[in-house]
Image: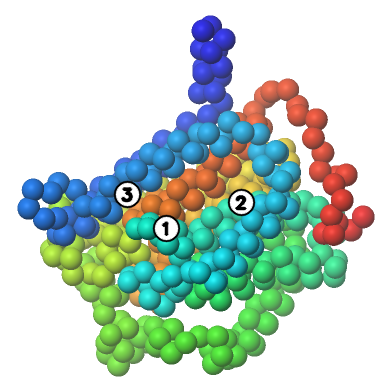
Amino acid sequence: MKKYFSLTRRFIAETDKILLLLIAAASVFGVMMVHSATRWRLGEGEFIERDAVVMIIAAVLGITITLIISALDYELIMKIWPIIGLFCVGLMVITLIFGVAPESRPDAKSWLQFGSIYFQSSELVKIGYVITFSMHLELCKDNINSFKSIVLLGIHALVPIGLVVLTGDMGSALVFVFMTIAMLYFAGLHIGFFGAGGILAVAASPLIWMYIFDDYQRNRFLALFRPEDFADESYQQRLGLNALGSGGFFGQGYLKGTYTQAGLVPERENDFILTAIGEETGFFGCLVALALLFFICFKMIKTGKEARDFSAQLACYGIASMIAAQVVINAGMVLMVLPVIGITLPFFSAGGTSTVCLYVGVGLVFSIYRYNRSRETVNFRLSRIASPFSEY
């Protein structure tokens, strides 16, 4: 019993309690807003809607998974990166073949359906990609600017991005791009390569516009500049802006938002949860939500900077950049500076599987924090692992 108490005390002492408090606060705030955004659908005698119940279960399960993963040595997780990579590719191929599109997202067959449960494969693949790409960068860090390394890193990135694009999930593909750029930057890739990549992206944009985007995707872009000519495509964003602006500084009050309680803004509990936050808690509430997400990313980056292993550093940066990218894209959609591409606000938007997968990534950061504290060094080296990604 004494030994068990000692282990428990050590586990608590080595847990990143600040990050745990931040994600718990974000999840509680998110559950409250999802409940408010779905309250209008309640029938007589019902207290809480299904989406809010799923969010509660996902948050509790997610935090539990985070703590379990944090107890595992991250080096053992990183060591099996080839298996993780194969699993992620296999999962996306299965999704490509058997994927379905829910009623809310008929344009993207990027979900696997298990009864009444929809699982978005790309959410879990994001975490797997962070692990495999971090290890890839670890193995070629001394020659990252060589032609061979650039080609292999590019292939590594294009495989998941291409598979995600083929399922129709352009939003998640964009998040993968942001994650890749961030991790390459932190890994020390020469700035000239980013400039060359930007030039290539601009040069390829006409081809992407004509041959990659569908008509509805092009219309969503055009709606940003001519909303009156694309009334259907801009409908959600125009209502969202009205709801967001009607909240003023402190909001109309929790459960009292005019647009939110009438269910007027489509996907207000999901991609457009920020409109419910703005309407009912005002500009102040939006600042609190975004501040929580900012400090979550900041704490993850801090954990990365303090990590001893290069791959662990990049993994923390990768998870932080994933969250940051989704926040920027989601806020851009709501503010009508970016087209609607179906990206959730981390910890706040409804969605059970996406929330749980997010917590899996958070658990990896917790593990890195725990096992980089003062303790006996683990005899584990990456330098002698044979890999086609290595220059040796």
Residue drawn at the location 32% of the way across and 83% of the way down = 233
* Extreme residue toward the left, this view: 44
Amino acid type for the residue under numbered disc 3: Val
Q: Mark number for residue 102?
A: none
Residue under pointer 1: 114
Q: Is residue 70 above or below residue 89?
A: above
Across and down, in percent, residue 115 comes to 37, 58
Nearest the viewer among 68 and 254 is 68
> In the shown orientation, is residue 251 left or right of residue 166?
left
State how the image is colored. Answer: rainbow
Q: Is residue 96 above or below residue 230?
A: above
Residue under pointer 2: 317
Q: Earlier in the sequence, mark 3 or mark 2?
A: 3
Say which quarter of the image contains residue 226. bottom left
Q: CA distance from mark 3 to mark 2?
A: 29 Å
Instruction: Assign the C terminus to one quadrant of the image.
Output: bottom right
Mark 1 falls on what kind of element?
strand
Mark 3: few, some, or many residues within 10 Å (few <14, many ≥20)?
some
Residue drawn at the location 68% of the way across and 56% of the way down = 85
Q: Is residue 62 above or below residue 138?
A: above
The answer to whether residue 328 is visible is no
> In the shown orientation, is residue 53 left or right of residue 322?
left
Amino acid type for the residue under numbered disc 2: Tyr
Q: Earlier in the sequence, mark 3 or mark 1?
A: 3
> In the shown orientation, is residue 17 left or right of residue 125?
left
Mark 2 falls on what kind of element?
helix
Q: Nearer the viewer, mark 3 or mark 2?
A: 3
Q: Nearer the viewer, mark 2 or mark 1?
A: 1
Across and down, in percent, residue 82 comes to 73, 53
Residue under pointer 3: 54
Nearest the viewer among 233 and 64 is 64
* Extreme residue toward the top, this view: 2
